[in-house]
């Protein structure tokens, strides 16, 4: 398949998206924190978190929006002289950060609100915690489609040239791969996620429907809003639904086969500048009030047991989370295989 030239625009290099070395930033202010997070978090970080932290703990938050894998590269590149204090990234990349010895273990003495989190939200004895679980389905243009009932719609002949999918460099790219495994095998997700050869065979059938592949979600989402494409799978509730509510001609479908949840993690960087303030920042993110505000804004599931609000999902819908250890062990190989497959 020959990809259109717009693909080169979307596949912005990690180097261009964010420098791995510490920026030219000398923090004379002791109340300043540099936070690494996803670019797709920009809207709610600016609207909710930044003003909250200024008022609640007196912190001036500077956040660098990029991909989880790039945040990991930054921490590796700046080992021993970190400038990021806190990083918010996906669980599979957290596992890699732990293996690299890049995270500071958290406890309820530093972060009291960890005691209020539901079971399973604190990982590896406090290496990181989950503060929200955005759900992922298929974002679609409502001027072009009346809805999306099944993941099979991505493969439909009428979708030719009207689909963009995430690269496997992006964690949300895994959803399309696992969906392909389910559709190819007919197995339940818990079993199908391990049938990777079948998944790639099914992914090969998707190539003719692709306009391009993205590594930066905002640019791809702009094309969805403009009607250049009809569907963008793997999109998060935390990104799609706020834009829908602002009037964009898009919605997020929860296909009948089920949806995925992405545990959003927060951690302290080992050797973090301004560590006490960083711990206060994490404690606030894990608080019931702030989690409720974030969950409402993003239609996510909160992890604090005292939180209210958040996602309103259909009854009986399958909600899946993959074996992240399996992903972490194989992701590099799968990404290379995916890149080779889609380059044909």
Image: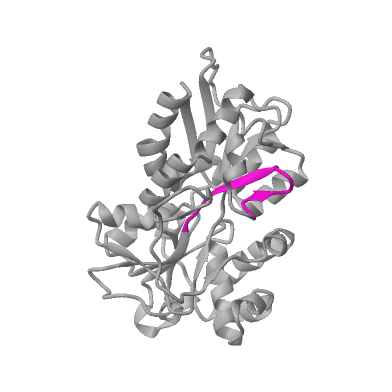
Q: Percent position (x, y) of residue 190? A: 64, 75
Residue at 24% x, 61% y: name it: 249
Residue 128 in magenta? Answer: yes
Residue at 57% x, 57% y: name it: 171
240 shown above or below 260: above
Q: Is residue 289 left or right of residue 267?
A: left
Q: Percent position (x, y) of residue 159? A: 37, 78
- Is residue 180 in sight in this rendering? yes
- Is residue 233 in sight in this rendering? no
Q: Which residue lies furthest to the bottom in this view?
A: 186
Q: Residue furthest top?
A: 28
Q: In which quarter of the image is the C terminus?
A: bottom right
**Which quadrant would residue 253 be assigned to in this image?**
bottom left
Q: In this view, does 19 lie to the left or right of 141?
A: right
Residue 137 in magenta? Answer: no
Foreground: 319 or 322?
319
Foreground: 77 or 86?
86
Q: Percent position (x, y) of residue 56? A: 44, 26
Q: Is residue 135 left or right of residue 321?
A: left
Residue at 69% x, 35% y: name it: 77
**Which quadrant would residue 73 be assigned to in this image?**
top right
Q: Percent position (x, y) of residue 64? A: 50, 36
230 shown above or below 269: below
Residues drawn in magenta: 120-134
256 shown above or below 261: below
């Amino acid at each position: 398949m020959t990809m259109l030239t717009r693909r080169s625009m979307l596949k912005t290099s990690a180097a261009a998206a964010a420098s791995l070395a510490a920026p030219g930033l000398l923090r004379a202010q002791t109340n300043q924190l540099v936070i690494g997070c996803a670019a797709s978090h920009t809207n709610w970080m600016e609207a909710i978190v930044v003003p909250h932290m200024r008022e609640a703990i007196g912190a001036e938050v500077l956040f660098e929006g990029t991909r989880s894998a790039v945040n990991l590269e930054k921490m590796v590149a700046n080992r021993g002289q970190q400038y990021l204090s806190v990083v918010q990234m996906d669980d599979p990349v957290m596992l890699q950060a732990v293996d690299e010895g890049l995270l500071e273990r958290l406890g309820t003495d530093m972060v009291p609100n960890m005691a209020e989190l539901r079971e399973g939200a604190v990982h590896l004895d406090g290496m990181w915690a989950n503060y929200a679980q955005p759900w992922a389905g298929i974002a679609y243009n409502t001027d072009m489609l009346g809805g999306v009932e099944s993941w099979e719609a991505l493969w439909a002949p009428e979708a030719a040239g009207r689909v963009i999918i995430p690269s496997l460099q992006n964690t949300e790219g895994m959803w399309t791969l696992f969906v392909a495994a389910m559709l190819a095998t007919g197995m339940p997700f818990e079993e199908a996620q391990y049938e990777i050869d079948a998944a790639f065979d099914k992914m090969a059938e998707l190539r003719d429907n692709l306009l391009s592949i993205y590594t930066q979600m905002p640019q791809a989402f702009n094309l969805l809003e403009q009607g250049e494409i009809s569907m963008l799978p793997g999109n998060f509730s935390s990104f799609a639904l706020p834009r829908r509510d602002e009037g964009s001609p898009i919605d997020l479908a929860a296909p009948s086969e089920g949806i995925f949840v992405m545990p959003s993690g927060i951690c302290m960087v080992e050797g973090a500048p301004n560590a006490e303030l960083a711990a206060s920042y994490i404690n606030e993110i894990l608080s019931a009030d702030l989690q409720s505000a974030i969950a409402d804004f993003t239609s996510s599931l909160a992890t604090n047991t005292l939180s209210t609000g958040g996602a309103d999902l259909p009854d009986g819908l399958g909600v899946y989370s993959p074996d992240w250890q399996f992903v972490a062990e194989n992701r590099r190989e799968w990404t290379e295989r995916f890149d080779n497959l889609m380059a044909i």
